[in-house]
Amino acid sequence: QGAGGRVEVQTVRSATVRLPGATLAGAPITTMALDAFKRQTGRAMEVIIGHPLFDRSVVRIDYLNRVMELLPAEGYEYTGTGVVLPLTFEQRLPYITARVTLPGREPVEGRFVIDLGSTQALILTPGFAEKVKALDAFPRTIEARGRGVGGQLPSRIGRVSRLEIGGIGFDQAVTMIPASAAHVGAEGAIGNIGGEILRRFVVTFDYTHKRMILEPNNRLADPFEADMSGMGMRMGPEGSATLQVDWIQSPSPAAEAGLKANDLIEQVDGRPALEVGVPGLREMFRRAGERHTFSVRRGEERLEIEFTTRRMI
C-alpha cells in the first residue's frame, strides 16, 4: 500500500546491498516495478534503501554538496551547533513535532513524518486536510500530480502562511494537498516534510539516540516556488529522445500557448530535450518571466510553441 494505491510486490528472502564503506547483508528485500518513477523524475531508480541502513548508522546528508556520509552509530557524539529534534517512530518512519499555520488560521502543532523521498516542502495528510477543511483556507491553488507507490496522486498546491521546525520558521512554504484519501503513516499526523525543506540543511539522522539534527546552509532563506508553466512532464517513450507532456492545467501559460497532453517535446530553447531533462525543465519552470521555445511533435505535426512563465500562486 502506497500513497498512490496498491501494487503487487514480491520478496527476495535474503540479499546483500553494498555501498562504499557499508554492507547490508542477509536482509529481505521487496521488489516492485520502478519504471514509472524513472519516467516522472527523469532519473534512474533501481534500489530504494530505507530503515535498515538508517537504523545501523548515523546518516549525514549534505544537500548543498550532494554528499551522504555514513558514520558508526556506536559511540557517536554530536558537538555542533545545529538544531537537535527528537524523533519518534511509527511503522519505522521518523516523525518530529512541528507547527503549521494555514492562511487566516491559528497555528496547529503536531506530528510530521520526515519524507526523504519527497521533493515537496510540505504535504498535508488527507485526514488532516479534510478535518480542518484545508483547501478552504488557501486563496489560490494550482493542480499537481505527484507519484507514490501505486500510481499518480492528484493534488492541489498552495502556500501555508508559516511552517515552524525547531524554532526555524519558513514563510509561504509551497504545500501539496492530496485529493486521494490514501495515506501511509501515523494516525492523526499532520503532514510530510520533504526535500524542499531538507535541502536547506545538512541533515543528520541519529536513530540510536532518536534524534535528527539540522545545520542550516546558505540556502536557508531561499524563496519557495512552484511550477509556473502549467504542465506536468515525464520522459518520452523509450527510444523517442523526447520529453512528454503528461497533463495540462487551465488556465496556465502552457494551456494558453496551445500545448496538449501527450505532446512530445524534442527541443527546449534550441537544446535537445533530453539534454535539458525533466529535472532541468522543472527548475526552469520555477522562475517567473522567462520566455521559452519548444519544438513539439504531435502525431505527424511539427510545431514551434512559445510561452512565458508566470507565478500562479
Image (cartoon, rainbow, N blue to C red):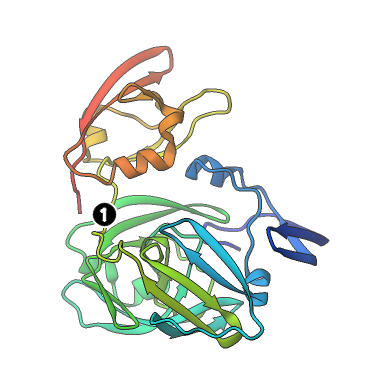
**Would residue 119 appear left or right of 94 to someone viewing this image?**
left
On-image quarter of the N terminus: bottom right
How crowded pointer 1 is (Cα within 10 Å; few <14, some 14-19, many 20+) is rated as many
Q: Which residue is mark 1?
A: 225
- Count of numbered badges drawn on the protein: 1
Q: Residue at x 60, y 43 (%)?
A: 35
Residue type for callout 1: Glu
Q: Position of residue 71 (x, y in %)?
A: 61, 73
Q: Nearer the viewer, residue 118 or 62?
A: 62
The answer to whether 68 is drawn above or below residue 231 in the figure is below
Residue plotted at (42% across, 65% down): 194
Which quarter of the rendering shows the C terminus? Answer: bottom left
Q: Which residue: 32% across, 56% down? A: 156
Q: Could you say whether the residue bearing mark 1 is in a helix, strand or loop?
A: loop
Residue 184 location (% of width, % of height): 54, 70
The reply, left or right, for residue 133 in relation to residue 119 is: left
- Residue 5 visible, this angle: yes
As drawn, 134 above or below 63:
below
- Report which quarter residue 275 is drawn in: top left
Q: Is residue 142 found left or right of 145 in the rendered image? A: left
- x and y percentages locating residue 309 in the rendered image: 21, 39
Tell me if residue 187 comes above or below residue 241 in the rendering.
below
Can you give x and y, in whole percent of width and height, for residue 38 in the image? 55, 43
Residue furthest to the front: 79
Q: Determine if residue 262 is in view.
A: no
Q: Quadrant of residue 262?
A: top left
